[in-house]
Image (cartoon, rainbow, N blue to C red):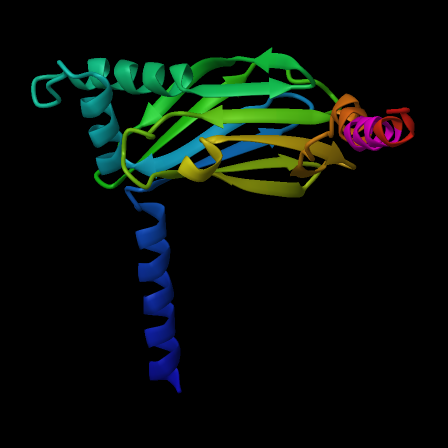
Amino acid sequence: MKTKIIILLMLFTVVTAVKAHNPLSAMYYLEVNQDINILNISLSQNGLNEALKKHFSDLNLETLSATDYKQKAIGYIKDNFNLIVNGVTIKLLEGGIKLGNHETDLKFIIDLFPKYINTLDVQIDAFKENNQHQSVFSIVIDNKTSRVILNKENNYKVALEFSENKAELKKEKINKSYLFVLFLIPVVIVTNNYIKKIKPK
């Protein structure tokens, strides 16, 4: 029995490690607090390297100093992360990065986050250079977590609506003027046919 438990724990650890270092995914975790709001990002070091090489065609990672690498990485993330809350663009302020052999972690302070969230639009173009990449965006408000996946299928952007600090995908609103036109067309056709029938020859 003990052997089975140990094997299961080892398998769980391996699977967790693989997920954490998956070069095809990045985790964005936004903590909304009263005092300070922080965006935490965890991603694969290999995935970051590949994206930087593809994004900056003249970049030579082997000759780049650690300081320059960090600046490039932070700038790349900031330029490719767009967040709009209640119709207002939210900026990433100061950022820090911790490089690892397999996983890299970044933290950013969030600018002027509103107290109440009605709508949130997020677009993450970072790492779309890497084939089959996906970003997982999570937001935590009052211990309620909402999570969405951004990938090629949704063009790396998602629109959310909030109710009691819990998010759901924003529903497309139907333009009622189009419905009126669709209703009007058959009426015009029927009326036109009727006029033709009663019109004296």
Expressed as whole percent of the image width and height from the top left, the position of residue 53 reads: 18, 23
- Could you tell whether 45 is left or right of 113 in the image? left
Residue found 7% across the figure and 17% down from its top: 63
Q: Image height check: is 18 above or below 58? A: below
Residue found 89% across the figure and 24% down from its top: 199
Q: Image height check: is 22 above or below 51? A: below
**Residue 190 magenta:** yes
Q: Quadrant of the C terminus?
A: top right
Q: Quadrant of the N terminus?
A: bottom left
Characterize the magenta stretch by its predominant secondary structure: helix
Residue found 21% across the figure and 13% down from its top: 68
Q: Image height check: is 118 above or below 133? A: above
How many labels, in total? Answer: 0
Q: Image height check: is 60 above or below 42? A: above
Residue found 73% across the figure and 29% down from its top: 173
**Residue 114 magenta:** no
Expressed as whole percent of the image width and height from the top left, the position of residue 72 reads: 27, 15
Q: Nearer the viewer, residue 146 or 122?
A: 122
Expressed as whole percent of the image width and height from the top left, the position of residue 111 reads: 57, 13
Farthest residue, direction left: 63
Instruction: Say whether residue 100 is visible.
Output: no
Farthest residue, direction bottom: 1
Q: Which residues are magenta?
A: 184-194
- Could you tell whether 28 is left or right of 42 in the image? right
Instruction: Say whether residue 102 is visible.
Output: yes
Expressed as whole percent of the image width and height from the top left, the position of residue 150 reads: 47, 36
Snapshot quadrant of residue 87: top right
Q: Nearer the viewer, residue 134 or 189?
A: 189
Snapshot quadrant of residue 55: top left
